[in-house]
Amino acid sequence: MTATQHYELKDREFRKISSIVYDACRINLRDAKKELVQARLAKRLRALGMDSYGDYLDLIEKDACEHTIMIDYLSTNLTMFFRERGHFNYLAEEVFPRISESSTGRIWSAGCSSGEEAYTLAMLLRENLPKINLMDCLILATDISTRMLEAAKRGVYTAKRMENVPEDMLEKYFRKTGRAEETFFEAGAALKSLIRFRYLNLIGPWPMDAKFDAILCRNVMIYFDKPTQQELVARFYNLLKPGGIFIVGHSESLVGINHDYTFVRPSIYKRPAGEERVAL
Ligand SMILES: C[S@@+](CC[C@H](N)C(=O)[O-])C[C@H]1O[C@@H](n2cnc3c(N)ncnc32)[C@H](O)[C@@H]1O
């Protein structure tokens, strides 16, 4: 097998892979994604020295670890620091002051990928809550991709990935680490101590019982079908404190989904505080 070997993914194999992925995490690989699946898994086949997708599917049936690795290869993990900046402005202006008053804060980054969203939240909590060391503030950051979670826990990023981080915060919260010719930046303890990175498949039980001031599930549910989105939106609602905020990606919305949130602005929703609830 050579590095340029072309593996052909048959329609039948693609359908099988799609159904395994859907059952595991509800990611919906529509037909248009066949080439993407083929390209992503070809790398894995090459690494394993395998000859065909048929052999790979036989392995998946026997090996639970490889099943997890396949989901890793097929999930889309694009993320960045300060992505969709308006969300962070809103949190800093409207949510963090309430956390400051109550002295307890819980934020959930659901589908955190390689951690940039959680580290952005941690920087902004530190910037906006000068007494944070005296408070009980935590960010829960979860994902289904073990590979992404490892990267998130390491918190080491290339200089290119730090482009959106303001210079003063970069200096304050990251340590420069040179490796060979490339410069890397590692998140410092001030950020890491505020975050708990955990494996969690959104399609499955959620073990936490804490209620959150804000839940960010941005650019994750777009990969799910409507019934799954409907179910998740309701489960997030139940885990929010009254007055808590639910944020989805800029290109997402709750249109077409039955829910009890009040609309704050595009992609930002609120669980009404008791007295705001309108009887219908
Ligand atoms: C495109 S990234 C979004 C990252 C970040 N929230 C942002 O907006 O920049 C989507 C993430 O959702 C995760 N994901 C997909 N399906 C999931 C599931 N069923 N449970 C938990 N995480 C999932 C993927 O592994 C991926 O890291």
Image: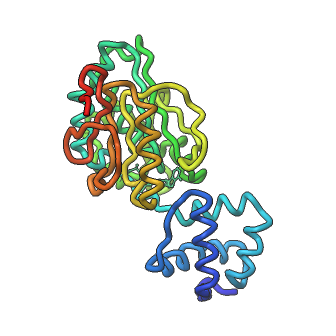
Left or right, 180 with reference to 93: right
Instruction: Find the residue positioned furthest to the right.
Output: 62
The quarter of the picture where residue 168 lies is top left
Does 147 sit above or below residue 234? below
Question: Residue 72: horizontal and vertical position, in percent?
Answer: 58, 60
Instruction: Find the residue positioned furthest to the front.
Output: 280
| Residue depicted at x 47% and y 74% | 30
Name the residue nearer the viewer: 69 or 181.
69
Name the residue nearer the viewer: 213 or 52.
213
Colouring: rainbow
Question: Residue 278: horizontal and vertical position, in percent?
Answer: 24, 29
The quarter of the image holding the N terminus is bottom right
Left or right, 248 with reference to 28: left
Question: Residue 280: horizontal and vertical position, in percent?
Answer: 25, 34
Does 178 sit above or below residue 210? below
| Residue depicted at x 47% and y 40% | 235
Name the residue nearer the viewer: 144 or 153.
144
| Residue depicted at x 58% and y 86% | 11
| Residue depicted at x 55% and y 79% | 38
How many numbered marks appear? 0
Question: Residue 83: horizontal and vertical position, in percent?
Answer: 30, 49
